[in-house]
Image (cartoon, grey):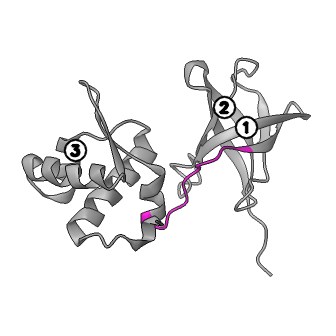
Amino acid sequence: MRMEQFDLSDDQEALLTEVVDTYRTTESPVSGADIAEAVGQQPGTVRNRMQNLKALNLVEGIPGPKGGYKPTGNAYEVLDRQGIDDPESIILSKDFGRVDVTVEEIELPDVYDPEECIARIHFSDSVSEFEVGDPVAIGPTPVSGLLLAGQVREVVKGANQLVVDVVQLETPDDE
């Protein structure tokens, strides 16, 4: 059964949207208290409604002090959003040398701020060969054809992530 067949209530859709949006920004489970505050509901009400979303396999409950909820791939489908379910091989150029890598996710949290545009790029493989200051170019991405170029600002080895100061961001022209 395809997930689009679910008819979510307005409250369920608001909760799911909050989980997806916050998770994409923070890359961490979203606490029930944070969801409740964002949607203007009581934490107990949110907990009860989140159980329904868990039963529909739209969110996953993460236990522990840093736990909360994280969206499943089905959540992206229900909201008609693009998630990266299957990581893709993308061309990465480091110091003008080509490297084939598997990118799991590219986040552009500050794309609307031309003074401070960064990209967080998550890889399946180790990023230990990269250093702060390395020039990099990535793309084109499989779906949007995005090309990104910049300089490594931070290497997060444990998370296989590069934070890149973006100097050029292009998509193919629509004709």
Mark 3 belongs to which amino acid? Asp
Mark 1 belongs to which amino acid? Thr
Measured from the top left, where is residue 150 in percent x and y? 73, 41
Measured from the top left, where is residue 40 in percent x and y? 14, 58
Which residue is identified by label 1? Answer: 102
Q: Residue at x 78, y 44 (%)?
A: 90
Q: Residue at x 78, y 49 (%)?
A: 139
Say whether residue 118 is magenta. no
Residue stretch in magenta:
78-88
In depth, the one of 119 and 72 nearer the eye is 72
Q: Secondary structure at mark 2?
A: loop
In depth, the one of 121 and 60 nearer the eye is 60
Chain-order first, disc 2 or disc 3 = 3
Image quadrant in which you'd find residue 135: top right
User: Which of label 2 and label 3 is nearer to you?
Assistant: 2
Chain-order first, disc 2 or disc 1 = 1
Q: Residue at x 73, y 57 (%)?
A: 146
Is the residue under label 1 in contact with that under label 2 (CB below 8 Å)?
Answer: yes
